[in-house]
Amino acid sequence: MTIINFNEFDLNQFPVGRTSKGYFVVDDDMRHPIPFFVIRSEVPGPVLTVTGGVHASEYTGIEAVVRLSRDADRLRSGTLIVMPVVNTAGFKKRSVSENPVDGKNLNRLFPGSPDGSASDRLAHALFSKVISISDAYIDVHSGDIGEALTPFTFFDAGNEASRVLAAVFGLPYIVGAPRDGFSCRASSSIDVPGILVEAGHSGSVDDACVQQLTDGIHRVMVHLGMCGEAMPASQIPRELSLRTLTSELDGLWYPQIQPGMKVSRGTAVGRLDTLLCDGGYVPLAKDEGIVLFFVNTLAINKGDVVCAVGVDADR
Ligand SMILES: [Zn+2]
């Protein structure tokens, strides 16, 4: 079994013309090895990095990246770096959003830190050793356990090359990433065009969404000149900005919305109540737009997203 210290990653250690695979370990922590594939063509070309499982229970996305790892035959030039499950500690525990080692959400930490806790160091190794030497980066997500969503792509709204990549990927909506710490914003900050793609829901493996994700990755590979096959043209995506409505209480949530549905200002999006059924209220949409995602479990916590609406970006 090949085990590589993540902080000593060097593309030149992998031979061309074949698929290398093994595990990265961060700071010699052997408890949570991170699987990788490095697929190098004999023909020089761009480096594309694709990660899954930054959120470890987003299984549709993980499955899409697993399938990509078997796609060595498609590669005509360049290098694919494929990591199906970045947060392996979370994968084992079926964690929602967090790395159970330190309770942090990896997708709030990029570019990471070499001096922080386990998640900070993992983000730092991934960012400084792999993303930084890439020509493009795709972080594949898919709706966590307890999350419904309609497919869309996050990108750094200020970065034109990332916007182009988001459009090429071909999901129906593209959305400016809302905050620092997102993988795709960190990559854009060092001029590596990066996107975070979302298709899937509820911690399931949705085969149609897996296909949407693998098709998008292949469109990006064609766009970069890494494979030559023709792909069906992607639709022209609609650019939206994100507005979220959050729960003001801990307790019960009865959503009355569906992913992709249109809401108007004042639309009742469901009903919230406490576990003693004495403080309920009906949250109302504040904006007209498309429902991009929401928590779809009976359990709700104060601050959870009861409705994330995408509004036309030029509004
Ligand atoms: Zn995610």
Image: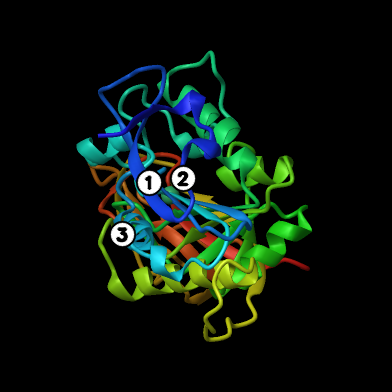
Q: Is residue 233 above or below residue 95?
A: below
Residue lying at 63% horizontally and 61% vertically, measured from the top left: 175
Q: CA distance from mark 1 to mark 2?
A: 8 Å
Residue 232 position in % (x across, y down): 52, 86
Question: Residue at the location (54% across, 38% down)?
Answer: 12
Mark 1 residue CB less than 8 A from any atom of ligand 1: no
Please state which of residues 102 and 281 is positioned toward the viewer in this rendering.
102
Label 2: few (<14), some or many (≥20) within 10 Å?
A: some
Contact flag, marks 1 and 2 (Cβ < 8 Å): yes
**What amino acid type should be assigned to the residue bearing mark 1?**
Ser
Q: Give the residue at mark 1.
A: 20
Q: Earlier in the sequence, mark 2 or mark 3?
A: 2
Camera-side mark, 2 or 3: 2
**Residue 264 in view here:** no
Question: Which image quadrant for residue 195?
Answer: bottom right
Is residue 256 something one can see in this rendering?
yes
Q: Amino acid at mark 3?
A: Glu
| Callout 1 secondary element | strand
Residue displayed at 37% across by 74% down: 211
Quarter of the image with the N terminus is top left
Q: Nearest to the eye among marks 1 and 2: give it.
A: 2
User: Which residue corresponds to mark 3?
Assistant: 63
Dot 3 beta carbon under 8 Å from ligand 1: no
